[in-house]
Structure formats: structure tokens, C-alpha cells
Amino acid sequence: MPFVLFQILNGLTFAALLFLVASGFTLIFGLMRIVNLAHGAMYLMGGYTAYAAATWSGSFLLGLAAGAVAVAILGLAEQALLRFVHGAELRQVLLTLGLALMMNDAALVIFGGDTFTVPLPAMLQGPLEMFGMAYPRYRLFVLLVGVVVLVLLWLLMNRTRLGALIRAGVDDPETIEAMGINIRRIFIITFMLGMALAGIAGALGGAFLSLYPTADSEILVFSLAVVIIGGRGSLGGAAVGSVAVSMLSTFGQVWFPELAYFVIFGPMALLLAFRPLGLFGRAT
Amino acid sequence: MNLSLHPLRAVIALALLCLVPVLLPGYQTTLATLTLIYTLLAMSVDILAGYAGRTPLCHGALFGVATYVVMYFVTTATGNPWLGALLGIAAAGVVALIFALLAVRTTGVYFLLLTLALGMIIWGVCQRWTSVTGGENGLRGTVRPEWLADPARFFYFVLAITALATFAMWRFVNSPFGLSLKGIRESESRMRSLGYNSAQHLIIAFVFSGLMAGLSGALYAWFNGFVSPSSVALAQSVKGLLIAIIGGIGTLFGSALGAIIIVLLENVVSSFTQRWSMVLGLLFVLAMIFTPEGLLGKLRQLTGRRRAAA
């Protein structure tokens, strides 16, 4: 099997997963100016919930739904807490950091330090033969989900009233509010949407990257890199950033295993030094 | 009540601290040493967060770089502990310089995120570069110079170093240079139009802060004789920042108060539950909601001398 093609597919499937996490992250960052450092912990929570629900019910889909719903509810609670520090950027970030520590520890209490893998239905197991090579079916499924979510989010943002309001909110929340629109409700909807995506990503990622106590900070750092590269509030930026980060990470791990982190963050840091707002970021 | 540094007060504080090994012998002295080390770390964070208006989340990594270098140099390379400590501090300074060059153009949340990501690179390297760092197992060994083996003597040594470093940092933030840093904090564009090279100021502040974080990291290596990736992890940066915040950002000496609270609390909490990280997170959330200005900041606010003391 052509080694490079295999690695490219690995990179793309990881990119799809990253996009699920980072798209919510970037929307929340763009719209509410909140850097949700608890996003990784939310991912982990979604994964653990999906694991518990899927093993209990035997249904992968149910696990996926449970992960999304549970994390959306957690997100609602986080939103309520964030109201106390409304408008103060740094206090918000640090508060979400505190929440991340708490959720990570709570997960450790409930699930312990063992590694779990969300069980897969039979139809997603095993390899798929194509173009003379075999590739795990499940990873292709994740890639498909990523693309579907990208399309749906694009339609939501560009073809619906809610999307128009979110886009307008990213650019100028005060004016929207002055036009008589309840921006708080849009905030809450976006926040829960982003959280649900993180929950889904946790469930999907939990099946091929597995779940362990430090998985949250790993995924958080990757999605930070995506958002920093892509620029805040930009879906396209999140997609491009996801592909860039996952390709760098995949090939970095193959070619320079000991320096894999350098390979991702080196280019990111350089980019930021020249374009502080990221590739698609706009100053407000 | 005036909370600024006054020679008499500094002497009284030092004299009281000198009594610690007499009044609180044994394990408590060790804890006091640890408190001093974390005070240093938090003050180094405060230089950037409080005076330059750039909140960093990479100081755990700078601290950890120094710890790793000391451990590696003394155990694996069987070098001299003093030279090792100097090398460790220098390494932290070099890493801080690189971070600074990349990060000074960003502000606010972006600065926080970028320094977080940069700190994670260090963590990733410590985790993966197993031939040097020992990976998850870390590095272990006695790296403290022989004549400091006695805990009380080591406490006095750390106290002396902390006092000197505190004085240096106090001079730093109250110098004309420190004032221009505060100017950058308040309005970078205005300082630039007045002809100040703000990037250069921030880089110098960052490197100085990194050297101080490295100093605390080197002392920690001597203190602990063990280092693993958890010493450079995000949680360490978070701890340094939380100590500075609880004490009061922009107060410098508040860090001592914060360190006493956090180190004591960590010790008490860890003695009957393993949920320290839960408590740390909760403290962060509560501090952000109720006292973002910190304890010393609050005190100054209440006594109405905030301006005069800052």
C-alpha cells in the first residue's frame, strides 16, 4: 500500500475530528470573545458519556447522541457561570481554565485512569478495500461526518437567519442588539451548538483515539493551534487550520517522532508572529 | 495602611522569616522553603501579568526547563550543582527570549493562548525526548550541594536568594523602565507614539521574568531532586498564575501571600484527599468571580491606598 497515501488519509480523518472540536471553539471565540479552555474537557466528557451510554445500550448512535446532549447541558451550565464575569476577557478565559481542571478531575473520579474505547457497531468495523489498499472503515466514517458537519455548518451560517445573526454578531454585537435582536439567545444557542459538536467529537474520537485522562489537554492544544492558524470566528479558517495541523502532526509523528510538537507549533508560532490574527482573522 | 516596600518593614519581614526553622522545625520548614520557591515563580508571572499587562501561561514551562537542565546536568552529566543551576537559569532565559520574540506582538487573550501553546511545546518535548528527559519516568537524583543538605540551612539559603531576587524584581518594576512597562500596559499605542520601543521593552521584561522563573525552577530541582513532565505541564503554569492572582496581580508582594495560601492548602487538601486539582480549579473559578484583584489588591482597595502603593 502506498505509505504516503495512507498517511494522508490518516491526516484527513484526524482533520475531520479536529474540525468538529475547533469549529465550535472558533464560533464561540468569534461571537462571544470567549476562549473556552474547557473545550478539551468537554470533548473528554462527551467521549466518556458516549462510552458509558454505548456500552450500556449497545448502540453507538445512542452513545453519540448522549455525548452531544450531555456536553450541551454542561455548556449551558458553563454559560451561566460565565455571566458572572461578563465582558472581562481574561477573567473569562481563566474561569474556563478552572472549569477545565475541575471537569478533568471529575472525569478521573468517575472513570479512573484507565483507557477506554467507545465500542463500534459491526458495520463500521474492519477495513474497507479500495484502490488496491485497505483502510479502516471507521476512520473513513469520521472523515464523512466531518465533511457533512462542515457542509451543514456552512449552510447554517450562510443560508439561514440564525447564521446571518451569528455572522453579524461576530462582527458587531452591539449593533445587532440595538436592532432589537436578543443577542443573549444567539449566544446561548451558539455556545450549546459548539458544545454539542465537542461532545460528538469526543464520542467519535473516543472510538479511534481512545479516552484517557490527558486526552482533553491534547485535543485542546490541537484545537487552539487550529483556531490560532485559522483566525477566530472563521469556519473556513477552522477547516483549513484543521487540515494544516493534522497533516503537520501526522507527518511530523512519522518523520520526527521526538519533535512532533515542534512540527505543529513551530509553523503556528511563526505564522502568528507575522499575522497575529491568523490566516482568516479580521480585526474588530 | 501603606503596603509598599519600606526598608524597615522588609527587615522585620526577613527577621520573622528567619525564625521559621526555629519555630516550625522539620516538615514545616520544608513547606516554607517550597512556599518561597513558588513565591518566586508567581512574582515572575506578575512582572508580565501585572506590570506589562500581558498574562502568560508558559511560566510553568520556563520553570520546568530550568529544573530539567539542572537535573540532567547534575545527574546524567555528573556536573557541578552550582554550574547546573546557572545553566538552568540561562536555559530558561534563552527559552523566554524565543517565546518573547514570537509573542510580544500579540496582546490579551491571544498572548495568553500563544504562550500556552509555546509552553505545551516544552511539555511535548520533555514527554517525548525520552533519551534525555527520561519521558514519563523523569529524572531523579540528589542535585543539591552537600553543605545545603540540612533542611534548615537550605531554607536560609532559599530565603536569602528569594530576598535578593525580590529586591531585584522590586527595583525592576519601580525603575523608569518598569514605569514605561506600565505605560505599555495602559496604552501601547500611546507609548509607541511617544517614541518608546514597546516590543523591545516587552522582550526585556519577558526575558527578565523568564530568568526569575528559571531561578525558582533551579531551586526547585535542588529542593525536590526529581523532575517529570508534570513539572512543566500546563497545571504548573496555572498554579503560578493562580498564586499571583490570589495574591493580587500587579502587587508583586501579594505573591507571597498567594503562595502561602496555595502551598498550605495543597498540603492540607492532599493529606486527606487526592482531589487537589479539583480544588485548584474551584479556587480559580471562585477567584475570578469574587476577587479578580486578589487579596492584597482587595486590601489596598479597602484601605484606599491602591494608587500610592502601586
Image (cartoon, coloured by chain):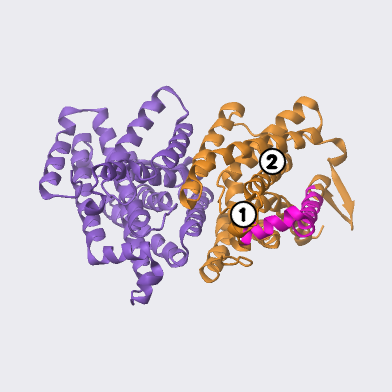
Q: Horizontally, is A270 left or right of A133 in the view?
A: left
Q: Chain B: give its colour.
A: purple
Name the one closer to the observer, A236 or A141.
A236
**Left/right of residue B75 with respect to residue A91 in the rendered view:** left
Q: From the image, which quarter does the C terminus of chain A lie in?
A: bottom right
Q: Residues within 10 Å of mark 2 (few under 14, many from 20)?
A: many
Chain part drawn in magenta: A142-171
- According to the picture, the residue beneath numbered tag 2 turns out to be A199
- Residue drawn at x 68%, y 55% as measured from the top left: A166
Residue farthest to the top, as pictured: B272
Q: What amino acid type should be assigned to the residue bearing mark 1?
A: Glu
Q: Residue at x 78, y 60 (%)?
A: A5
Q: Position of residue B288 (x, y in %)?
A: 44, 42
Q: Chain of mark 1?
A: A
Which corner quadrant of the image does residue B225 belong to?
top left
Tell me the orange chain. Answer: A
